[in-house]
Each structure stands twice: as C-alpha cells, then as structure tokens.
Amino acid sequence: SCLDENKAFLSTADSAVKLLTDATKSVSGWKGIEYRAAFPRDNPPGANFYPPDMDKMEFELWKNGLPEKEQKYATGFFTVIKRHDALLPSILAQSDGSNQTKTSDDLFVVPYSEEYKSSLEKAAELLHKASECSDSPSLKNLLKTKANAFLSNDYYESDIAWMELDSNLDVTIGPYETYEDGLFSYKATFEAFVGVRDDIATSQVKLFGDQLQDLEKHLPLDNIYKSDNVSAAPIRVINLLYNSGDVKGPQTIAFNLPNDERIVNERGTSMVMLKNISEAKFKHILKPIANACIREEQEDYVDFEPYYTHIVCHECCHGIGPHSITLPTGKRSTVRMELQEFHSALEEAKADIVGLWALNFLIKKGLLPKSLSESMYVSFLAGCFRSIRFGLEEAHGKGQALQFNWLYEKGAFVLHSDGKFSVDFTKKVEDAVESLSREILTIQAKGDKPAAQSLLQSHASLTQPLRVALDKIEHMQVPVDITPIFGTANKLLANDQ
C-alpha cells in the first residue's frame, strides 16, 4: 500500500493455491505438491526491474565490468535486469544438490520491448489506429511515434513529439517516472494520462516559463553550477479524463517530463497541470487540513490561488538547477545517476522549496501580486501535512517531511499550545526557504550521495510536531487523497468490452 508506508495488504491466506500435478512422478492416490504462493511482506526495493535476490553491490560489480556503452544500457530507463539461470527450472540449476552461490556473471539486460512484448504490441496496434482517427497533426505524430517506440525501445523521437503536442486532446503515455525503482531510481514505469486542454488556464501560466532563465541565474547556488541555456518549459493545463498505469498511491496534480537527460539538455522539459484534480484536492483535503491545523488568524490565507500557483512553480523548478553535472574528478554525470535511491525524494523537495523561493523572487520583481506573500507560505504549511500523509516511503512525502522539519527548526513554522501552527512572517521564513534551497541544490550540483543520505536521515522523519498535526487530521477523518471516478471513460470502456 503506497499510502501506508508500503505495508502489505495481502497475506499468505489471500494467495493462490496451486497443484503441481505435472512436476512430479505419478504416484497412485497422490495429486501432487500443494503450496501457497505468499506475497512478500516487504515491498521489493527493486520492484520487478531486477532479480529479487540481487543487491546493489552485485549490480555495481557487474555493471563496472561492462563496456561504457553497455553500462549506459544497463542503467537506462527502458531495460530490466535478469539472471541467466532464472530461465531454467531451479531444480535443474541446482541438480547436484549443492548450494550454489549467485555471481554477477548471471546478470544480463532485457529491453522493455522484449520483456513486455505482448502488451506493447497490442498497445502499439491501438495507438496506430488512434492516430488514423485524429485530425490533429501533432497528436497524430505523437501516437505514431509512441507506437513505434513501444516496439523499438527508442523513445527519443516520441518524447520530442510529446513536447511539441498542440492538440485539444492531450495524451501522455509511456514509461516515465522512476519512483518504483527503490534501488537506483534508474528504471521507468508505464503510465497514461488523457485530458482536455484548458486554453484560458494555459495562457495564464505562461509567465513562469518565460522567467526560467532569470530564475536559474539568481538561484541560491554558487554561479559555477548554474546553466546559461535553460529552456522555457511549455506548460499545458488540462482537465483529466482518464489515467492508468503508474498512478496508484498519491494522485498526481502535475508532471514535468521527460526525464531523459539528453532531451532535458537539448530542449528542456514540458509540463502538464491537471487543474480539476488540483481543485478537488484543495476542496476535499487541503481546506479541512487548514481548519484542523492552522491558527484561526492565518486560516483564511489558505486559498486555491496560492496553492495552485505554487504547484505551477514547483513543476517549473524541476527544469532549473543541476541535471547534468561534472564531478570533482572531472567525469560528466547526472544528478540521478549519482544520488541513485535518494534522487527522487531530494528532487521533489528541491522543486517544492525552490518553488517557494521563486515565488518570492517573482513577487519582489513585481511579476506576481504582493497579496501572495503571506498566503503562499501558509498554504504551503497546510500542504506539508497533506503530502506527508502519503508516507515517508514515498518520494513526495519524504521530501515534504524534510522541508517541514527544516523550516520548523529555523523557526519559520511555529507550533502553539493549542496544537495549531502558524508561519513567522518575519525574515525567518524567507531565510529558511533560501537556506534549504541552497543546501539541496549544492548537494545535487556536487552529486554528493553521502550528503543527500545524511540530509534525508536527519530531517525526513516523523517528528513530534508532525505527529501533533497528523493526529488532529486523523481525528477529523480527513481523507489522505482523492480517487477520481472517470465516468465518461468508464462508459466507453464498458461499451468496448
């Protein structure tokens, strides 16, 4: 359960029973071996991207023995790692009865196009049919190139087509996010989003894309680490009609893609905002949380405008700061490759806290109204409690705990005797936001994995102030998240069956 610290919700008693009638010698009166296939108690950190008995050290030893090109393939988004002997029945692999030790020589790479061939062939066929139905040239191109990518395992052209999409019907489909890979954050998981573009809202958020280079220039980060060629991320605001795939757990309100560093360096990123999901979360979750946890004199600051504006800024800030980096040894690398399993949580925290810093920067430039100055901080405080409830095993929840605890330690957030919180609007909150932004950005720029681990271990925990807030929210039975009901899509799918 992604919303419950990855706690198992299926047990042995829920598992299937199998009779292995063909696996043993026939014996009169005996039906075969009967067993229960139990679900693992703990969520496998490598999901199904790696052999379940492979650890990080074995992978690194194997990878480091490969040629450079094959190393990139092994750590790429669109491959799984398998063992050769896993293809044989275990009884044959250990026919001599000895307890054989696994070695890194067992490992090999399989592209997604082969591993998930039957599903991807069907998906590609349907995408080609959909492209023939479209009268939008950019949508037609996206669907065709994505179908080809499913079969070739090369997603570059289709990701460019996705960034150039200009259609009333907005589609995102393919392997993108790497949250499920808890070992290295290398492997991408498939997801799909279909929505209708909101042209008015899209025009309103153009400001942020236009300011990206200026934000990069003024980041609280040493100049040596800054980029002088940040591309403005196109922003599309949609109302979601349907999603599927890697969308369990927290219901996303926006995403910034692609994650492929080649495209990020060449073209930047593109952003999709799900406005109807944001509105639902604000109404059903954030407002009740504010009632429970924010002091009365600041409760009215929790408003949809600053909440939504920060979401937009969060997504924009994924596109600035370090991505491709140069290590102290002179080697070129990426933040994702260096920080590995700590990358996702730290990147989410970066986008959040640098997003707050960026809002303040734009307010001081006169590009955003001063009325946001207080409301954005209080809305952010209430939002901390919302995201932390996703659990500290989830990247957004872990990143939010880090931010709350840092700002609380700096005196920016204050817990009162009545168990409610407020924001200290003196320079404390501004300084705390800037100091954490600098801390995270510098760790990313240096590719400093030990520092990333230390920061998360020291601050991404369920502290007593957080427990006070979460107990209040639990007592009021505020939902952890929403579950959209896609009425139109469900009717279409039902008719299709």
Image (spheres, helix red, strand yellow):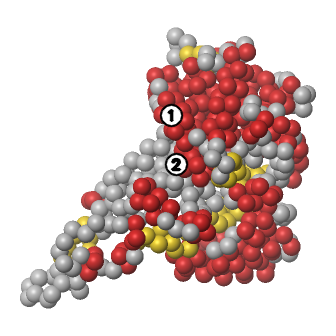
In the orientation shown, which residue stands out farthest toward the left? 28
* Distance from Cα at disc 2 to Cα at disc 1: 13 Å
Residue 121 visible in the picture: yes
Residue 455, percent from left and from top: 54, 33
Check disc 2 and report its element: helix, strand or loop: helix
Residue 154, percent from left and from top: 67, 73
Query: Which of the pair 361/473 is nearer the observer?
Result: 361
In the picture, residue 426 is in which quadrant?
Answer: top right
Where 359 falls versus 63 (above or below)?
Answer: above
Query: Which of the pair 26/486 is nearer the observer?
Result: 26
Residue type at mark 1 is Ser
Residue 56, percent from left and from top: 43, 55
Residue type at mark 2 is Glu
In the picture, residue 279 is in which quadrant?
Answer: top right
What quarter of the picture does the C terminus occupy? bottom right
The mark that comes first in sequence, 2 or 1, is 2
| Label 1 crowd (10 A; few <14 / some 14-19 / many >=20) | few
Left or right of 246 in this view: 362: right
Residue 78 visible in the picture: no
**Which residue in the structure is indicated by mark 2?**
341
Query: Which of the pair 4/142 is nearer the observer?
Result: 142
Query: Which of the pair 85/478 is nearer the observer?
Result: 85
What residue sits 16% from the left and 82% below the top?
31
Q: Do callouts 2 and 1 mark residues in contact (Cβ within 8 Å)?
A: no
**Which residue in the structure is indicated by mark 1?**
454
What residue sits 33% from the left and 80% below the top?
88
